[in-house]
């Protein structure tokens, strides 16, 4: 068995050398630009090219890591790659993460929206300031929300409804639509979304991923991990032509399986797509991504003493600021005023999330590129026929199987949609502050890396984030206006918060916390202790080739890019008239 596996392994490496030279070049993307001036950043093309350069560097390292794997030993029943199996499947997932051939036009990879130096979130500062959602394979179709961080997403459970609490827990994506109901793994389920999302990687058929994997440089590693017969599929002669055409194109006439396979081959292709997802999950669950290597982890181990501001921020996090009610640190109950917890006991690897969802009352962000995609692109696809009639109801829309989301796998959940309108996933607070080493902070004056926070990217710094939680409902701070229309004499995000996009189900445990300016800053200092890379280097964090930003104030960071929200039409029937309708109030 060992000699056979070694023979196959050497053959695989030889095959990979041949395959690598046969990868077709990227197809030039037709331009789709329905946007008014200022929505697309001026440096967008240059920044996309910069990220692709960074991706190529990391991909090269991953290929070398694969080639450095020791010869495999396949043994036992069920068959196991002895000693090397874990690293093999993690490396396979890493190669997939940085493969731009897993897009119709071979011009974006998963990593185009999820790079290591920002905890696998959006890597382009100007996009984070302007268009919010990242462009996909068709430049410049874009999605509805900002790119959520990958780190620690593999630890979210399968989506479930807790009847006693009346709450949903688990899933992946902002709206929890990756339930994990079939793979029993939400993170793997999530990995199956972007490759066939029309605004992201955009394949017209899941079989296209299987087809491209069968021609990939790392096909030998895939077969080593998942089996020799994985790609024994008879693809039609026109498969590449179909797969080089982005999903949603008029030529498909709504057909979501245009690669016509036999039932047997379709089943095999679906199996490969499941393996794609499981491999990516293995990578995202590994220490390459979810590292547990922060100052806070060292603190729990007794190997780091927090500074005064960090310690004060932690006490506020667990007490007065009420952060710990959703972003759980695994260390027990909240502190009462005046208390200070000096113990270090905690559950294993606290994740700083409750796995639930909340509506924090964010205003509609008129910079979101999705609102403007109301005309057909060069392929005849209209990403958003609703325009500004679209409202992001998050989990509520998913429970209704509504516009722009996936179908819910559980009809009994639909009745709970009105109670979950506006709800977005409570992401882990870990790595919320991660930036490239050369841009050591998220906060102005910097030098800083410009990130964006919450699902619609409205908040541009951690200072703003904490200030929002602190003052959203404070008397004299909340105004019945939309973004870009704060009254004279006020400053948006400082002493003016526009009204929520979705006024129902708002989390009222925050909004008027009574924190001082110093206490807000102390919480930011604590959040920075949750950044991986303190106890050991975080892989590929130093690959950023771009430019840091500097100047200004964290309180008003990004405000120069605020634009007035146009007069809003009523919420579109495709969103707000699906039963059961939003209640107790209609969505304006």
Image: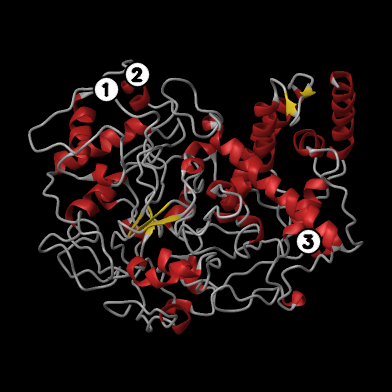
Q: The N terminus is located in which quarter?
A: top right
Mark seen at residue 473: none
Q: CA distance from mark 1 to mark 3?
A: 53 Å
- Which residue is outermost to the top? 303
Q: Is residue 536 left or right of residue 199?
A: left
**Is residue 2 positioned above or below 515 on the image?**
above
Residue 531 screen position, x and y as percent: 39, 32
Q: How is the image coloured?
A: secondary structure
Question: Dot 2, crowdedness within 10 Å: few (<14), some or many (≥20)?
Answer: few
State the SS at label 2: loop
Asked if residue 394 shows in the view, the reply is no
Res 204 quadrant in image: bottom right
Question: Dot 1, crowdedness within 10 Å: few (<14), some or many (≥20)?
Answer: few
Residue 196 screen position, x and y as percent: 66, 60
State the SS at label 1: loop
Q: Is residue 508 left or right of residue 72?
A: left
Residue 498 screen position, x and y as percent: 25, 67
Q: The C terminus is located in which quarter?
A: bottom left
CB contact under 8 Å: marks 3 and 2: no
* Of pointers 1 and 3, the one earlier in the residue sequence: 3
Per the image, the residue denoted by label 3 is 243
Per the image, the residue denoted by label 2 is 301
* Of pointers 1 and 2, the one earlier in the residue sequence: 2
Per the image, the residue denoted by label 1 is 344
CB contact under 8 Å: marks 1 and 2: yes
**Is residue 360 positioned above or below 386 on the image?**
above
- Residue that appears at 85% across and 34% down: 16
- Residue that appears at 26% across and 19% down: 305
Asked if residue 503 shows in the view, the reply is yes
| Residue in front for this viewpoint, 23 or 390 | 390
């Amino acid at each position: 068995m060992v000699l056979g596996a070694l023979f196959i392994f050497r053959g695989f490496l030889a095959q990979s050398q041949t395959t690598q030279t046969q990868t077709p070049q990227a197809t030039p993307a037709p331009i789709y630009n329905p946007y008014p001036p200022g929505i697309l950043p001026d440096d967008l093309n240059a920044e996309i090219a910069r990220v692709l350069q960074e991706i190529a560097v990391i991909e090269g390292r991953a290929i070398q890591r694969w080639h450095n794997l020791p010869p495999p030993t396949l043994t036992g029943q069920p068959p196991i790659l002895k000693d090397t199996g874990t690293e093999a499947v993690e490396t396979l997932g890493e190669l997939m993460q940085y493969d731009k051939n897993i897009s119709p036009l071979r011009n974006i990879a998963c990593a185009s929206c999820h790079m290591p130096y920002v905890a696998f979130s959006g890597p382009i500062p100007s996009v984070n300031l302007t268009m919010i959602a990242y462009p996909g394979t068709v430049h410049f179709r874009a999605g509805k929300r900002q790119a959520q961080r990958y780190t620690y997403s593999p630890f979210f459970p399968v989506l479930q409804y807790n009847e006693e609490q009346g709450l949903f827990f688990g899933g992946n994506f902002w709206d929890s639509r990756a339930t994990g109901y079939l793979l029993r793994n939400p993170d793997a389920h999530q990995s199956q979304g972007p490759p066939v999302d029309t605004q992201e990687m955009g394949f017209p058929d899941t079989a296209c991923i299987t087809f491209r994997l069968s021609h990939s440089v790392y096909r030998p590693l895939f077969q080593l991990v998942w089996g020799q017969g994985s790609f024994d599929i008879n693809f039609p002669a026109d498969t590449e032509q179909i797969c080089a055409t982005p999903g949603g194109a008029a030529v498909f006439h709504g057909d979501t399986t245009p690669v016509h396979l036999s039932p047997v081959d379709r089943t095999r292709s679906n199996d490969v797509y499941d393996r794609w997802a499981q491999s990516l999950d293995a990578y995202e669950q590994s220490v390459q991504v979810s590292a547990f290597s922060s100052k806070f982890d060292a603190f729990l181990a007794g190997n780091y003493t927090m500074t005064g501001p960090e310690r004060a921020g932690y006490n506020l996090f667990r007490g007065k600021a009420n952060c710990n009610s959703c972003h759980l640190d695994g260390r027990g109950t909240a502190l009462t005023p005046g208390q200070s917890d000096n113990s270090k006991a905690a559950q294993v690897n606290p994740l700083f999330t409750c796995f639930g969802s909340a509506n924090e009352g964010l205003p509609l962000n008129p910079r979101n590129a999705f609102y403007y995609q109301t005309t057909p692109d060069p392929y005849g696809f209209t990403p958003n026929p609703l325009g500004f009639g679209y409202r992001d109801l998050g989990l509520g829309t998913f429970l209704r199987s509504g516009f722009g989301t996936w179908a819910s796998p559980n009809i009994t959940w639909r009745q709970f949609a009105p109670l979950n309108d506006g709800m977005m996933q409570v992401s882990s607070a870990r790595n919320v502050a991660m930036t490239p080493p050369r841009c050591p902070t998220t906060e102005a004056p910097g030098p800083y890396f410009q990130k964006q926070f919450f699902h619609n990217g409205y908040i541009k710094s951690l200072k703003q984030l904490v200030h929002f939680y602190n003052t959203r409902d404070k008397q004299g701070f909340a105004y019945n206006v939309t973004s870009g229309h704060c009254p004279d004499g006020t400053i948006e995000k400082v002493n003016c918060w526009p009204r929520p996009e979705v006024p129902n189900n708002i989390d009222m445990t925050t909004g008027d916390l009574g924190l001082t300016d110093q206490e807000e800053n102390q919480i930011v200092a604590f959040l920075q202790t949750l950044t991986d890379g303190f106890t050991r280097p975080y892989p590929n964090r130093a690959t950023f080739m771009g430019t840091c930003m500097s100047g200004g104030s964290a309180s008003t960071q990004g405000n120069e890019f605020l634009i007035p929200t146009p007069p809003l039409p009523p919420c579109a029937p495709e969103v707000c008239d699906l039963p059961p309708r939003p209640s107790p109030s209609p969505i304006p």
